[in-house]
Amino acid sequence: MSAPLWPAPTVTAPVTATVRLPGSKSVTNRALLLAALADGPGAVRLALRSRDADLMTAALRTLGAEMTAVDETPESADWLFTPGPVAGGGHIEVGLAGTVMRFVPPMAALADGEVSFDGDPAARKRPMGTILSALRALGAHADADTLPFTIRGPVTGGEVSVDASGSSQFVSGLLLTAARFEKGVTVRHVGPPVPSMPHIEMTVQMLRARGVEVDDSEPDIWRVAPGPIAATDFTVEPDLSNAAPFFAAAMVTGGAVTVPGWPLETTQPGDLLRHLLAEMGAEVTRVPGGLEVRGSGTITGIDADLRAASELTPTIVALAALADSPSRLRGIAHIRGHETDRLAALVTEITRLGGDANETEDGLEIRPRPLHGGVFHSYEDHRMATAGAVIGLRVPGVEVEDIATTRKTLPDFPRMWAHMLGDMS
Ligand SMILES: O=C(O)C1=C[C@@H](OP(=O)(O)O)[C@@H](O)[C@H](O)C1
Ligand SMILES: C=C(OP(=O)(O)O)C(=O)O
């Protein structure tokens, strides 16, 4: 059965809007897990509500966390935690969430009893072997190398070598729980470069903010000392990566989009949009309390290494397909293991609309050509769906299949998109 089609709105006038974004998926899911492991009652405020965040809260409850949502809106919740021992015996559904499938198993290895994991059919294809072998090396039992699997502790911790070139989440997952391992952990990466390094910095910074001792002074080695994780009252930043399609709307239409609450300093890789979009021809300005992106309507192609911010690739590709010169994106071989094989999916969908793109060993080449309408498939990938919406702004007749898949990290993308466009479409 095919998913419903969403006619992407096309606009001719410049889009001018302020777009308030809900909390970061990456920060929310780290903060929730750390609050559940903390040494006392704490709070996670303005936590994202979305499929990935809901999967994390359900997983933590399965592991015994006592948590109550207060001040709920459709987009956010303030969670109050009363931590207790990690409980085994349960089953956890990870959906298609990398942060749940890679961050929760190390925590489950603290439980006294088995914990089983499964996820969407597409999740069974995502790489898991690296973190499951690492958990085995640290004392736990894991009965498979992909979903579904069962974890049984105890995990004692110690030293482990991993090849994290497939995902930074292998490192983040081990570090997040490691302070609770008897011996802490030393993770040594051996292999091609680790992608998405800002996400590891996010992990390290959030651990340090909770009193955990982390040594990252040597490249590719992270040491976490055993000890308590301090309880905090913590507020989640807006999701800067999710700003990408909205800023892209300003660029495609020659308008201006402002995102309030853009932090002055952050570990979110979405902050790299400031440089990437400027390089593609946007005027990017910090305005009081936010960030404004203004487009001229003309987009310049880009030659960029996106390894640090690989989750921005689908939006950058949508812009590149509408640019006035070719683009080359490098350093992103590992996104073949994201929600879908993003390199293949982007080439297929851009080509389907009359565009010209190809895969390289570690990225994509895009040569702009006039595009026509058609179905843009989303492959259960929220960022593929929003890339289709961006192209549809300029190309009439684009229909995005399964726009609801955007619920992975945004509670109501179609409403936000319509709100941004006002009555222009
Ligand atoms: O730790 C995180 O929150 C994330 C890390 C990155 O994963 P990869 O290192 O697999 O790219 C990123 O792409 C993903 O969206 C979120
Ligand atoms: C790669 C992504 O997600 P995940 O956290 O599931 O890895 C993403 O959001 O682009």
Image (cartoon, rainbow, N blue to C red):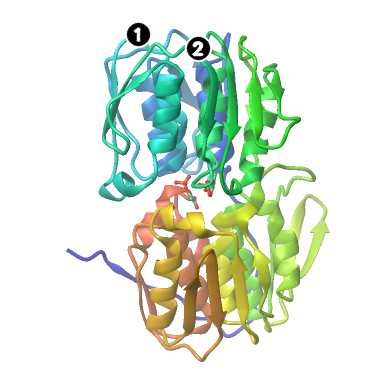
* Residue 169: mark in rendering: none
Q: Is residue 31 left or right of residue 143?
A: right
Mark 2 residue element: strand
Furthest residue toward bottom: 370
The residue sitting at 57% across, 85% down in the picture is 12
The residue sitting at 25% across, 64% down in the picture is 3
Looking at the image, which is closer to me, 93 or 262?
93
Looking at the image, which is closer to me, 166 or 370?
166
On the question of residue 425 being in view, the answer is no
The residue sitting at 78% across, 49% down in the picture is 289
* Residue 112: mark in rendering: 1
Badge 2 amino acid: Thr
Q: Is mark 1 within 8 Å of ligand 1?
A: no
The residue at which mark 2 appears reads as 82
Question: Relative to residue 53, is residue 260 depicted above or below?
Answer: below
Query: Where residue 290 sits: x, y (%)?
Result: 75, 53
Badge 1 amino acid: Asp
Mark 1 residue element: loop
Looking at the image, which is closer to me, 225 or 56?
225
Q: Alpha carbon of mark 2 to alpha carbon of mark 1: how far?
A: 19 Å
Kindly check if marks 2 and 1 are in contact, taking CB atoms under 8 A apart as contact. no
Q: Nearer the viewer, mark 2 or mark 1?
A: 1
Looking at the image, which is closer to me, 43 or 320?
320
Q: Quadrant of residue 307?
A: bottom right
The residue sitting at 66% across, 44% down in the picture is 198
Question: Relative to residue 53, is residue 416 depicted above or below?
Answer: below
Query: Where residue 114 sits: x, y (%)?
Result: 28, 16
Question: Relative to residue 416, is residue 269 depicted above or below?
Answer: above
Query: Where residue 371 sits: x, y (%)?
Result: 47, 88
Q: Quadrant of residue 200?
A: top right
* Earlier sequence position, callout 2 versus callout 1: 2
Query: Where residue 345 sits: x, y (%)?
Result: 40, 68
